[in-house]
Image: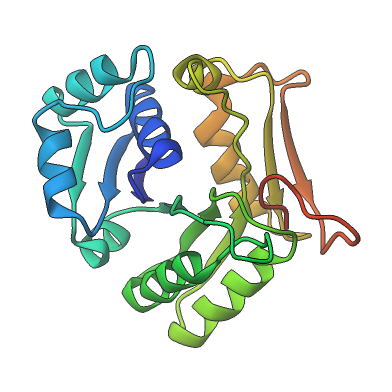
Amino acid sequence: MKIAVVGTGYVGLVLGACLAENGNTVVCVDKDRSKLDTLEAGLMPIYEPGLEELVRRNGHEERLSFTTDLMEAVRSSSIVFIAVGTPQGEDGSADLQHVMSVARDVGRAMNKYTVVVDKSTVPVGTARRVREVIRRETEQPFSVVSNPEFLKQGAAVEDSMKPDRVVIGIDPGDERAGEIMRELYAPLVHERDRQRVRAGGRRRGRRAPSDRV
């Protein structure tokens, strides 16, 4: 599959490298050109066991690349992960301005059906807001999927390559997105119980540690 990952922080970089290692063609997008130059040179802005090797190998084998051109990355991909930061505000809530800014730019760039995946750590209801933002910017068909990460620092590569579980939230009836996400993660999980594709609406009452539909 051809995949774009927007954001090269902790989650985005590990995600991009592991998806590339699994045989996908991945382009990671970031506004910071100097950071991308560092990554292209095989130098890591974070330390995670095994990450540097994955980035270097998949870059050399042309499965992993880095760019500042979000529009081209979106148009060349069938799945776009939003993995930008959501820093806490003064009231303790997640600041979603970067997520919504990316969603807007992704909507403007779309030229075909695209699955947009919320990977950033966000509160309940964010998928609905992302959907609304994208819908204002495009007439192209698209799906918004929630796919929370369960990574432990120091074991992020291992957790990504051999996950205990993969949780995927989709809209009720959106089998197209469900099948695409199942196909993406199938090599990483055993079907029996570790991969769950859930259709659902908004959940009430608490802030999720990662995004839910």
The reply, left or right, for residue 11 in relation to residue 39 is right
The residue positioned farthest toward the right in the image shown: 205
The reply, left or right, for residue 196 in relation to residue 203 is left
User: Would you identify the image quadrant in which residue 185 lies?
Assistant: top right
The one of 93 and 129 positioned closer to us in this rendering: 93
Which quadrant would the C terminus be assigned to in this image? bottom right
The one of 91 and 70 positioned closer to us in this rendering: 91
Residue 67 at x, y = what percent?
18, 52
User: Would you identify the image quadrant in which residue 72 lies?
Assistant: bottom left
Residue 54 at x, y = what percent?
28, 19
Residue at 23%, 28% in the rendered image: 44
Q: How many marks?
A: 0
Residue at 16%, 27% in the rendered image: 43
User: Would you identify the image quadrant in which residue 75 lies?
Assistant: bottom left
The colour style of the image is: rainbow
Which quadrant would the N terminus be assigned to in this image? top left
Residue 102 at x, y = what percent?
41, 67
The residue positioned farthest toward the bottom in the image shown: 136
Q: Is residue 172 above or below residue 52?
A: below
The reply, left or right, for residue 45 in relation to residue 156 is left
Residue at 71%, 49% in the rendered image: 169
Residue 69 at x, y = what percent?
19, 62
The one of 114 and 106 positioned closer to us in this rendering: 106
Q: Is residue 83 above or below residue 157?
A: below
Q: Is residue 105 above or below residue 76?
A: below
Residue at 26%, 57% in the rendered image: 73
